[in-house]
Image (cartoon, helix red, strand yellow):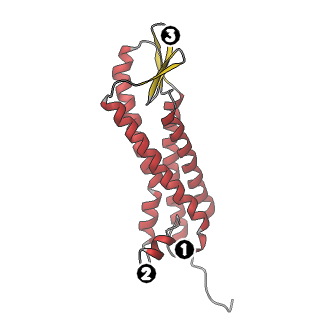
Amino acid sequence: MLYTLAGGGTLCGVAALVLLIVSTATDFWMQYRYSGSSANQGLWRFCINHKCHAHTISVAFWDATRAFMLLAVLSCFAGVVLGLSNAHNYQFQKHVGLYGCYFLESYLLTGYIDLFFIYFFISSHPPFSGFLALLALAIYTGVTVTFFGKRFVDWRFSWSYIIGWVAIILAFAAGVFQLCAYQQTTAEPAPSNNPDS
């Protein structure tokens, strides 16, 4: 059961990471009509009739959305790397914690590390990235609805924006799976070292 929960958390984290990268890098956050032509825009550039141009103005909401999305990608990447390193360190997991914290204990600390602290810190990476992406999408939504919604009559959110929301859900699910994996490790009895049995 532990492998299932930890693996599910890692799988959700990987899927969230891929979706966050695609959402951040693509130019289809919003589609609209501009002077009778189809147009779309992303965080980095806008396209009119398939000719793309970088955003020429630096507005605070663009910068905030970009920054939060990039931080979300980095945080999710850290959670995925730590989650994948857990697969190689299962023997040390019951003594030290998830995500390869054996190295932390071996090289930096002496004694035992509180498992709850490690699980809470490490399992908070995907939900933290989800929270950062949530802030980015909330800022983008608020400005788009109040400003662009009035400027362009025929507009809609597009697929890059939508997969950003899906990535948020997956990031929070990854954190839930990892916390459930922690509960499973604390609920399982420790293996006996009795050679007589």
**Residue pointed to by mark 1:** 94
Counting residues from the N terminus, which is met first, the one under dot 3 or under dot 2? 3
Residue 85 in the image, given as x and y percentages of width and height: 56, 62
Q: Nearer the viewer, mark 3 or mark 2?
A: 3
Mark 3: secondary structure: strand
**In front of the other: 184 or 88:** 88
Residue 62 in the image, given as x and y percentages of width and height: 36, 31
Would residue 1 be visible to someone looking at this image? no
In the depicted structure, whether residue 15 falls above or below residue 32: below
Q: Amino acid at mark 3?
A: Ser
**In front of the other: 75 or 9:** 75
Position of the N terminus, as image quadrant, is bottom right
Name the residue rendered at 54%, 69% in the picture.
185
Residue 130 in the image, given as x and y percentages of width and height: 45, 45
In the depicted structure, whether residue 68 falls above or below residue 85: above
**Residue pointed to by mark 2:** 111
Marks 2 and 1, how far apart at CA: 14 Å
Image-based side of 8 in relation to 53, left or right = right
Q: Residues within 10 Å of mark 2 (few under 14, many from 20)?
A: few
Q: Nearer the viewer, mark 1 or mark 3?
A: 3
Residue 13 in the image, given as x and y percentages of width and height: 54, 50
Q: Residues within 10 Å of mark 3 (few under 14, many from 20)?
A: few
What is the residue that sits farthest to the left in this orientation? Answer: 60
**Residue pointed to by mark 3:** 37
Mark 1: secondary structure: loop
Name the residue rendered at 37%, 19% in the picture.
148
Counting residues from the N terminus, which is met first, the one under dot 1 or under dot 3? 3
Q: Nearer the viewer, mark 2 or mark 1?
A: 2
Name the residue rendered at 57%, 54% in the picture.
10
Q: Amino acid at mark 2?
A: Gly
Image-based side of 18 in relation to 120, left or right = right
**In front of the other: 166 or 187:** 166
